[in-house]
Image (spheres, rainbow, N blue to C red):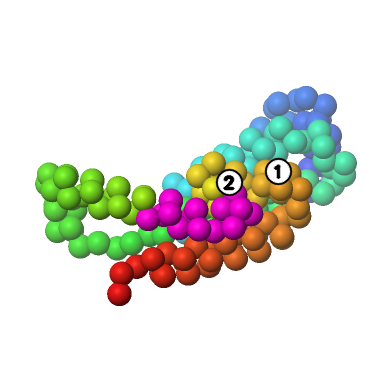
Amino acid sequence: MSPDTIFNIVVRAQAGDTGAFGQLFEHFQSRVFGIAMQRLRNTAEADEVTQEVFLRAFRKLAQLKEPAAFAGWLCQIATRLSINRAVRRPPETACEPASFEVSQQSPDTAANDLMQLEDAEQLRDGLDRLGDLDRRTLMAFYFDGQSLKEMSVVFDSPIGTIKRRLHTARHRLHDVLTTMQPA
């Protein structure tokens, strides 16, 4: 598709033509999927990110001031959403098949429950020993599930400052929890 054709389709889509947006989806879907796949290396997650990218693009298309910049704008959304997904997902661990069988058996629930309660209590104690700003920062991100952007608004600070505070607060919590461990 030529740049002029894309420009015309974007203008039609901005005017509310859903068929035109469908054409954009068909043309750019593989490129967006490739960007997501490059970052995530997981087909299912890349599919989800691709859908989210086009949903976000559809909602925000009216805000695009320069229709000729659509391709770069879309790729930027794909890159940011892929990075966010990669950062937020839990780390993957490889397990032997036998370990899955063990997890299917009924665990010693009383001991597990007690360990979880002790861990949660130790975490609460550690958080209580932190300064107010460190504690609020960690609580907002990990317990309240706020994004960096949301935290930036709540704390009235730039996102870079929020990232630094999270980094610092995590290290301080680690140090506090380490000192709380019995020798």
Q: How many marks?
A: 2
Observer-nearest of 39 and 69: 39
Label 1 crowd bin: few (<14), some (14–19), many (20+), radius 10 Å: few
Type of residue at label 1? Val
Q: Amino acid at mark 2?
A: Ala
Where in the figure is residue 177, as x and y percent of width and height? 42, 64
- State which tag comes first along the sequence, 1 or 2: 2
Query: In the rendered structure, which segment of residues is drawn in magenta?
Result: 122-136
- Front one among 106 and 8: 106
- The majority secondary structure of the magenta stretch comes to helix
**Is residue 25 on the magenta stretch?**
no
Task: State the CA–CA distance, disc 1 to disc 2.
Answer: 9 Å
Judge from the rendering whether residue 75 lies leftward or rightward of residue 84; answer left or right.
right
Residue 119 horizontal side relative to residue 6, left or right: left
Quarter of the image where the C terminus is located: bottom left
Circle 2 is placed at which residue position? 140
Helix, strand or loop for disc 2: helix
**22 or 113: nearer the eye?**
113
In-image side of 176 versus 83 (left or right) = left
The local crowd at label 2, few if under 14, some if 14 to 19, many if 20 or more residues have their Cα within 10 Å, is some
What residue sits 67% from the left and 38% below the top? 56
> Label 1: which residue?
154
Could you say which disc has been placed on residue 174 in the image?
none
Relative image position of residue 166 (x, y in whole percent): 60, 59
